[in-house]
């Protein structure tokens, strides 16, 4: 196990009707808030009215930035920064999924910065401060509600890039599982793939001597495998939604489940290149990329893949070789993703081979990616070809 430091400052307020606690939690953060939300789901579900009532009860002046896109755009972030500066906003409240929360984070770090917030995504500047922000989560997937990361798309340049900072962690996140009852089946599936992928990026590690972390990872994977099909079938099943929500939050919250372990993140880098150009849902892209990444790299550490097959999928040895065990675990992953409605090939989401070179090149823009197996441009291209 490697040495580590771990600090996560986000307070979680979890449970049915937790949104009723928004007013009391936001009071104390000033008098002026920017409410950030997406394309309208919060108006259809009635959540918007509840949030506004809470903000009024806390005596906040509310400014609004609506219409955050899935795969949020830099241009929309710029609008938010402008609004905050113009109105002297003191707190940012994101109500939505990962895209809304990420846009809110980019606005929060962009307001006190003199340059363009895109500098942070392109690693041209360090984040020194941010406006405080809070979230009301409506979709279980990214973990953005309890981490300091954001992923922003510069649509004009077809670039999707991320930043991470301790200053971008939410002060608090309201996690009320019933707010995810209305998430459609496909987004439920993509979110489940995303949280499993976050665990994979940490679990498939070269670091040894980490049995607790491995079991934490495996327990999240098993819990998603149990609950995602229920949530897809019965969208208003509270327990399934609650378990998925907790899984998503724990899967990517500053590395709690993988402290002291080297992480990989190559599959995320590859997926971000796909959604940067084709604007597909992140979890859909991961469902295509991850099983192929697994096939490409499993020989690097076959014992971990055997353990994965045995513990997560309960695949029995029954005379199988290590290779056969590893491949059976990968096949089980693929079959599970398909069973909940996630795509298997780029062709399933209408993508051909036309941009493979560009995607491979951009994925390694800052150097080789991954640590389980370091991937250069040719490796990324080979994995993308397997995805066709
Ligand atoms: O825009 P609205 O109308 O809200 O609709 C959204 C959107 O169309 C809808 N939705 C959300 N909550 C709903 C709902 N519909 C009905 N009922 C509800 N309760 O779902 C659609 C997708 O929302 P989005 O926020 O885009 O999904 P997700 O949470 O999966 O976020 C994806 C974004 O997060 C980034 C991805 O790359 C992508 O840009 N990621 C962020 C990470 C982070 N900050 O740590 C890590 C991830 O790996 C990921 O890269
Ligand atoms: Zn992800």
Image: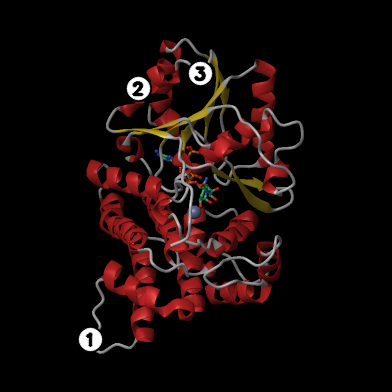
User: Closer to the observer: label 3 or label 2?
Assistant: 3
The local secondary structure at tag 1 comes to loop
Disc 2 element: helix
The numbered mark, 1 or 3, whose residue comes first in the sequence reads 3
Q: Can residue 87 be seen in this view?
A: yes
Establish if 100 lies above or below 202.
above
Side (left or right) of 148 relative to 238: right
Q: Where is residue 200 in the image (x, y as percent from the top left)?
A: 43, 63
As rendered, which of 309 and 235 lies closer to the eye?
309
Residue depicted at x 42% and y 22%: 51
Q: Quick one: label 1 or label 2, which is nearer the N terminus? A: 2
Please tell me whether mark 3 sits on a helix, a strand or a loop. Answer: loop
User: Furthest residue to the front?
Assistant: 3
Q: What is the quadrant of residue 334 in the picture?
A: bottom left
Disc 1/disc 2 C-alpha distance (Å): 53 Å
Which residue is the site of mark 1? 318
Instruction: Describe residue 32's horizontal placement relative to residue 182 as left or right.
Output: right
Quadrant placement of the N terminus: bottom left
Classify residue 152 as left or right of residue 343.
right
Q: Name the residue under label 3.
A: 29
Write down the residue under mark 2.
21
Would you say the residues marked 3 and 2 are in contact, meaning their CB atoms lie under 8 Å apart? no
User: Residue 276: horizontal and vertical position, in percent?
Assistant: 63, 54
Residue 348, given in percent of the width and then of the height, sits at 50, 66
CA gap, disc 3 and disc 2 = 15 Å
Q: How crowded is mark 2: few (under 14 residues within 10 Å), some or many (20 or more)?
A: few
Marks 1/3: CA distance?
60 Å
Is 112 above or below relative to 287? above
């Amino acid at each position: 196990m490697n040495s580590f430091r771990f600090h996560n400052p986000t307070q979680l307020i979890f449970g049915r009707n937790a949104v009723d606690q928004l007013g009391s939690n936001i009071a104390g953060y000033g008098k002026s808030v920017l409410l950030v939300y997406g394309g309208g789901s919060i108006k259809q579900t009635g959540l918007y009215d509840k949030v506004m009532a809470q903000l009024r009860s806390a005596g906040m002046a509310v400014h609004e930035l609506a219409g955050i896109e899935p795969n949020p755009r830099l241009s929309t972030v710029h609008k938010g920064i402008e609004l905050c500066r113009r109105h002297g906003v003191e707190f940012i409240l994101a109500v939505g999924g990962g895209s809304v929360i990420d846009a809110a984070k980019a606005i929060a770090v962009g307001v006190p910065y003199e340059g363009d917030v895109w500098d942070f995504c392109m690693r041209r500047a360090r984040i020194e401060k941010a406006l405080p922000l809070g979230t009301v989560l409506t979709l279980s997937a990214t973990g953005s509600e309890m981490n300091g990361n954001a992923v922003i798309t510069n649509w004009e340049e077809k670039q999707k890039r991320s930043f991470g900072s301790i200053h971008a962690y939410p002060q608090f996140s309201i996690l009320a599982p019933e707010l995810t009852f209305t998430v459609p089946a496909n987004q439920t599936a993509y979110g489940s793939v995303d949280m499993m992928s976050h665990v994979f990026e940490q679990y498939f590690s070269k670091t040894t001597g980490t049995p607790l972390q491995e079991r934490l990872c495996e327990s999240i994977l098993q819990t998603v495998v149990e609950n995602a099909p229920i949530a897809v079938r019965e969208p208003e099943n509270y327990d399934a939604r609650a378990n998925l929500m907790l899984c998503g939050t724990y899967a990517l919250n500053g590395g709690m489940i993988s402290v002291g372990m080297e992480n990989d993140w190559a599959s995320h880098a590859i997926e971000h290149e796909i959604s940067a150009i084709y604007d597909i849902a992140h979890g859909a892209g991961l469902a295509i990329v991850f099983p192929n990444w697994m096939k490409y790299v499993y020989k690097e550490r076959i014992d971990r893949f055997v353990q994965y097959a045995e513990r997560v999928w309960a695949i029995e040895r029954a005379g199988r070789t290590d290779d056969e065990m590893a491949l059976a675990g990968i096949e089980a992953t693929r079959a599970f993703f398909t069973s909940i409605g996630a795509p298997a090939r780029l062709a399933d989401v209408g993508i051909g081979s036309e941009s493979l070179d560009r995607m491979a090149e951009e994925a390694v823009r800052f150097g080789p990616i991954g640590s389980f197996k370091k991937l250069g441009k040719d490796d990324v291209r080979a994995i993308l070809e397997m995805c066709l």
